[in-house]
Image (cartoon, rainbow, N blue to C red):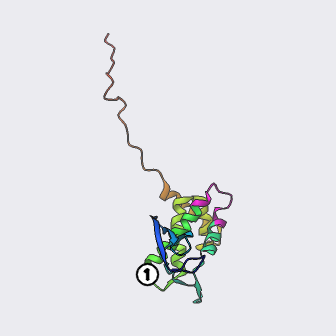
Amino acid sequence: MQCPYCGSERLKVLDTADSRESIRRRRECLTCGARFTTYERAVAVTPVLIKADGTREAFDREKLKRGIWHACAKRPIPAMAVEQLATNVERYLQSLGQAEVSSRVVGDKVISELKDLDPIAYVRYAIVYLKLDDLYSVRAEIDKLLAEQAAPPVAVVDSQPADLPLITSER
């Protein structure tokens, strides 16, 4: 590494801070005295996507986020949630450790994440991704989602709490 001011390779690390994403180092040039910050992070390779028609395309995080934003339009979903969803998908693809994966893998991961994030966004994405081309198939997907989200049966609670005395009237 060289000093960005004078080009010297005589550097000293003053401070190091680790985060989940990178390592921040504060450095000082021993030649000119300039101080500067560097960031180190691992470069993870995201696999190439194999489209349904067999063509190959580089993974594009911005394209992924645009698709998610279309599904989330006019929904109360914070920008950070969309950013996190895109990060989750990207990390998942990297964790597969493969040079190429089907674009279907991306769609499956997005739809799974959207189902947990927002049911309306999930249905919007599902209409395009699952190619739901008529109202009956859309209705079937909504019914399936409703069945999965149905609240568990409520347990029957004893009508007399144990810590309260039973009041009876004697006649």
Would residue 170 be found to the left or right of residue 125 on screen? Answer: left
Residue nearer the viewer, 89 or 143: 89
* Position of residue 168 measured from the top left corner of the image (x, y, whole percent): 33, 17
Would residue 139 be found to the left or right of residue 155 on screen? Answer: right
The residue range painted magenta reads: 69-80
Residue placed farthest to the top in the image?
171
Residue placed farthest to the front in the image?
31
* Position of residue 37 measured from the top left corner of the image (x, y, whole percent): 54, 68
Q: Residue at x 63, y 72 (%)?
A: 128
Residue nearer the viewer, 139 or 165: 165
Instruction: State which quadrant residue 84 falls in.
Output: bottom right
Mark 1 residue type: Gly
Residue nearer the viewer, 48 or 106: 48
- Alpha-carbon neighbours of circle 1 within 10 Å: few (<14), some, or many (≥20)? few
Q: Residue at x 32, y 21 (%)?
A: 166
Residue nearer the viewer, 152 or 125: 125
Q: Which residue is mark 1?
A: 97
